[in-house]
Amino acid sequence: MPASLRPTRLRPWGLLVAVVVLAGVMLGSVLLGAIDLGAGRVVGEIVAELTGGRSPLSARESAILWQLRVPRVVLGGLVGAALAASGAAYQGVFHNPLADPYLLGAAAGAGMAATLVIVLDPNASSGIAGPVPIAAFAGALGGIGLTWLLGRSTGTSTATLVLAGVAVAAFLTAIQTFLQQENTDELQRVYAWTLGGLNTAGWQSVLLCLPYIGVGAIVLCFSGRLLDVLALGDDEALSLGIRPVRVRVAVLGAASLATAGAVAVSGLIGFVGIVVPHLVRLLFGGSYRVVVPMSLIGGAIFLIAADIVARTVLAPAELPIGVVTAFTGGPFFLVVLRSARNRIR
Amino acid sequence: MSRLLPKRGSRAVVGLFTLVGTILVAGCASHAPAEPASTGSNAGSAFPVTVVVPGGNTPVTIATQPKRIVSLDSSDSAILHAVGADKQVVAVDKDSDYPGAPRTSIDATTPNVEAIAGYRPDLVVTAYDNNNVVSGLTKLKIPVLLVNPPTNIADAYALWSDLGKATGHQSEADTLVNKTKQDIASAVAKTPKPAQPLSYYYELDPTFYTATSHSFIGSLLGQFHLTNIGDPADTASSAGYPQLSQEAILNANPAVIFLADGGSSGGQSPQTVQARPGWSTITAVQNGHVFVLNADDASEWGPTIDDLMTSAAADLAKVGQ
């Protein structure tokens, strides 16, 4: 579809459908879990909480609902939204459909820093606001910063930046692997962390990542029009009075902030940043004024749904959510691509 | 902990590090210690012996009493020490830590055949066939005893006995087995048994990996008339070590929690457990029945199981009161 024919505004019905689906997935995720609390009793508990009535749940069941399950749903939504919207933004900045939050060394930096902390201090807490997530956050920003410096020093094209990202990721991964091999006793913890997951989620994790994801998401939502202009080319952008480099720095900064916040609380969860923005494009068109906000909602839906599977399919055991996102996202993506191709014909 | 849990992804990193390992060979080989002191053997005349390890490799025939043993596993090293074969041991891997152990930089998860051969061993004992170390050493005509980690106490005792037989210390091994059996039986007998079995959660790491009754440690603790809350989550692929969801742990409401990730192996403690969201509703937390186990003892199948069971018995006695 030519760019001029793309819908450039968020259509109310599309937004409404997305919000309704999100609400439905969230409700389903609150009702379903490793433990069956009974849908009616959960709804009764929510009503009781809102109206101050008598709760049908025991104190322990109430703790399962409000201190484990609900924050996990909220966190899954935040992390999914951050990864998908960042993915959309990276794809816009680099004009590269394969760009995702992990392309620029964010994941490698986070993984290396988390490994370093686990190795240096085996007592380091992976708990929220403990040294491990904080190091992951710093590492994600550090990885992206290193990529930016390296990319800037060798040229200004987006291709150089992507190549710098690949080089930085390979370098940081090599350091991480070396650290792991030197300290095989800690391998298990490092693997558990890099596989990602929302298993240890609580309200503290929500509070930890909310400011970063919130600020990043707001900036990204307002940069949709600028990304649309960038898609026309740097010369056109300049002629419209927009400085492409400044836009890229601002968008990359916001996307990286959101990514780092997500990585710090959930470990490394792949695939969301690529699949969701492309699904949104296929369904709603390619304008970034639509893609970025719809990716926020779509990412939340995708990750909350994936987490329902992760929590229930092997219950009472857990399945790493990264396995679910890759296993369900991959085939789903192929089906959508095929049907879109048939429709275009 | 990595000794007990499935080694996810280790093959990939192993491949990457083959090169580095090769470079390190020269360095490791040059650290080979001098000839060992006399063996102090009491059963040298019994050789040759043929040893069949439960779950191990094919029967291994050892022609003469080994005098240069390399052990690649901390449990096996501790057993060799306990049966009096330590004077025959010339090198152990970096995790073996019995008093006076000839520790080297050998990493049992990424062993290098050339580095091991550099110690001129006449017997190598290993618990895992990482990097195809067994076939590599066999090609060099070095006898290898592959001692797969046992999943129950009977297999563990059989392994101790086999290691005694392979090194010419059969009678010491039998004595050790009998003493440990008696100690554990007496610890179990002294522990009060409630009418209803106590439920317990065994935590391997802060992301809620657990050891079920089908694991070695679970089979040991099961002797105390306990039920393991991880059992319903166990599948063929988790092989005794599934990851639980917090909801399931809270819902199971264990009466006792054992932490194998306390202190230097995860930093967990009764205080950190109490502070987790929702965990204060668990009976074990409310009654103060959250116990930190010695993580090294808890991950081994050597003679330290004696200490582990004594310590668990003392913990459970507090619950019974």
Image (tube, grey):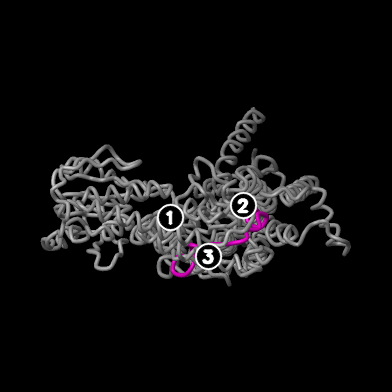
Tell me if label 1 and label 3 are in contact, CB under 8 Å.
Answer: no
On screen, residue A297 versus residue B69, left or right, reads right
Q: Is residue A252 visible?
A: no
The answer to which of marks 1 and 3 sits earlier in the sequence is 3
Measuring from the top left, give residue A316's x and y in whole percent: 62, 48
Please name which of the two marks, 3 or 2, marks the residue nearer to the observer: 3
According to the picture, the residue beneath numbered tag 2 turns out to be A84
Number of the label disc, if any, that sits on residue A126: 3
Q: Residue at x 18, y 40 (%)?
A: B139
Dot 1 falls on which chain?
A
Amino acid of disc 1: Thr
Q: Of A62 and B251, which appears nearest the observer?
A: B251
Task: Decide: few, some or many residues near mark 2? Use Cα within 10 Å; few <14, some 14-19, many ≥20.
Answer: many
Number of the label disc, if any, that sits on residue A160: 1
Please name which of the two marks, 1 or 3, marks the residue nearer to the observer: 3
Q: Residue at x 31, y 47 (%)?
A: B147
On screen, residue A286 versus residue B169, left or right, reads right
The answer to which of marks 3 and 2 sits earlier in the sequence is 2
> Compared with residue B138, is residue A181 higher up or lower down, i.e. above or below?
below
Region rendered in magenta: B248-265
Residue B263 part of the magenta segment: yes
